[in-house]
Image (spheres, rainbow, N blue to C red):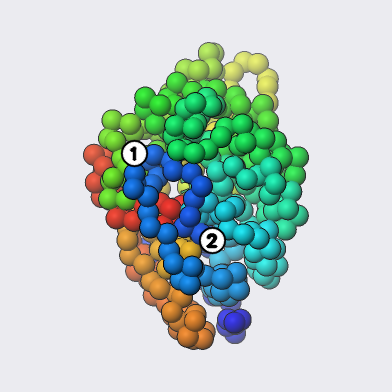
Amino acid sequence: MAIALAEPMSLVDPQRRVIDYLRISVTDRCNYRCTYCMPEEGAAPAARVDVLSFEEIVALARAFVTLGVRRLRLTGGEPTVRRDLPALARMLREIPGVDELSLSTNGERLVALAAPLRAAGVDRLNVSLDTLDAAKFARITGRGALSRVRAGLEAARAAGFASIKLNTVAVKGFNDGELGALCDFAWERGFVPRFIEQMPMAGGQTFVPGQLLSAAEIRAAIVAAHAGSRLVAHDGDADGVRGAGPARYHRLVDDQAGPLRRFGVISPMTEHFCDRCNRARLSATGALHACLAHDDAVDLRGPLRAGGTRAVVEAITAAIAQKRDGHDFQLVGLGGPRKAMVQIGG
Ligand code: SAM
C-alpha cells in the first residue's frame, strides 16, 4: 500500500525538536545474548504474523519520509538475521527523499552480507564490538565469535561504506582496561570508535549499577591509554563523522602529527542529550516509540493493515505530539522502560 500526502511536512514535537531520523527494527530476534541487553530468560519473540512484511515497512517508511524524515537506520534485534535484508535495504533506499540509509549490526554475518548490503545502497555501518579478547567476547555476547566479527569488519572495509563506526558499551570491570586498545584497533582500520554508557533497560533487570562507566571516565581512560596526548572537542560535522546520532565527538591530539584520532561518546546516563533528540523508533511489529527510555508506543500496524492511509499519518503525528521531554534513567538502575532493547529496536 502506498501512502501519499499532497504537502511535504515536518514532524515537530512539543519541544520544537524536528524528527527527521527513523530507526527501523526489522526483527526482534537476535543471534547474540549480550548480558546488558537481554534479560537472562530472553525476551519472547513476536509471532511471525505480527511482524511487518517488507512491503509494510516500506509503506510506513514512505509515510515518515512524506512527513519529513530523511535518514533511516535498520536495526533490531539483529537485523542481519532477517532473511533477504539486502532486498529490503534496496526498497528503502529507492524511496524518493531518503538521503541516507544506515545499519546497526553485531557483525556476526557481515562476511556474507557486507557487499550485498553496500550494493543495495546502505551508506553507513555501525558494528558493535565490546572487547578484543575472544574469551571475553564469547562471554558478553553469550554466543558470538570475535573471529567472525573481525572477518566481517574486513569484509565491510572492502565493501566501501561511507563510514564504519564501532560501538562499545563501556562496562566497568569488563572492558574499562581496553578502551584505548579499542580506539587503536578502530583508528588503524579507518573506523570511528564510539563508547556508550550502559542504560537500565528491561526494568533494570540487566543493569548492575557498579558497572556504569561514565562519559567522563571513558574520556579519561582513553587519554590515559595514550601517553602525551590531550583531548579536544571535535565537531564531527566538519568531516561527516557526526551522523544523525547523539554521540559527542572528541579528538586525541599530541605533538606528533598523525592520523585523525576521533572517538565518540554516547552518554544517556551522565550527560543527557534529550534536547538534541531527532529520532523515533519503529519496532518490528509496527509500534512507534517516540522515546527509547519510555514504554509509550503507538500502533501503526493496525491502521496500516486496515488500509487507512490517513489513520497511519495521524497515528505518527499523535505519537510525536506525545514525545517526552527527556528520559528518567537513574544511576541506580531505575527509571528505564519495562521493554528490553531488542524489543524497542536498539
Ligand atoms: N544487534 C544490533 C547491534 O548490535 O548493533 C542492533 C541492535 S543493538 C540493541 C544496538 C546497540 O545497542 C548495540 O550497540 C548494543 O551494544 C547497544 N545496547 C544494548 N543494550 C544496551 C544497554 N543496556 N545500554 C547501552 N547500550 C546498549
Residue closer to the observer: 245 or 156: 156
Residue closer to the observer: 126 or 224: 126
Query: Which is in the foreground here, disc 2 or disc 1?
Result: 2
Residue 6: image tag? none
- Which residue corresponds to mark 1? 270
Q: Secondary structure at mark 2?
A: loop
Residue 26: image tag? 2
Image side of residue 52 versus residue 259, left or right: left
Question: At x 49% / y 26%, what residue is drawn?
Answer: 135
Compute the Cα span from label 2 to label 1: 30 Å
Q: Please, what is the three-letter code of the amino acid marked with disc 2? A: Val
Image side of residue 297 versus residue 177, left or right: left
Badge 1 residue CB within 8 Å of ligand 1: no
Q: Is residue 221 above or below residue 275?
A: above
Badge 2 residue CB within 8 Å of ligand 1: no
For mark 2, does the 10 Å Cα neighbourhood hold few (<14), some (14 to 19), or many (20 or more) residues? many
Image side of residue 269 versus residue 151, left or right: left
Location of the N terminus by quadrant is: bottom right
Q: Please, what is the three-letter code of the amino acid marked with disc 1? A: Thr
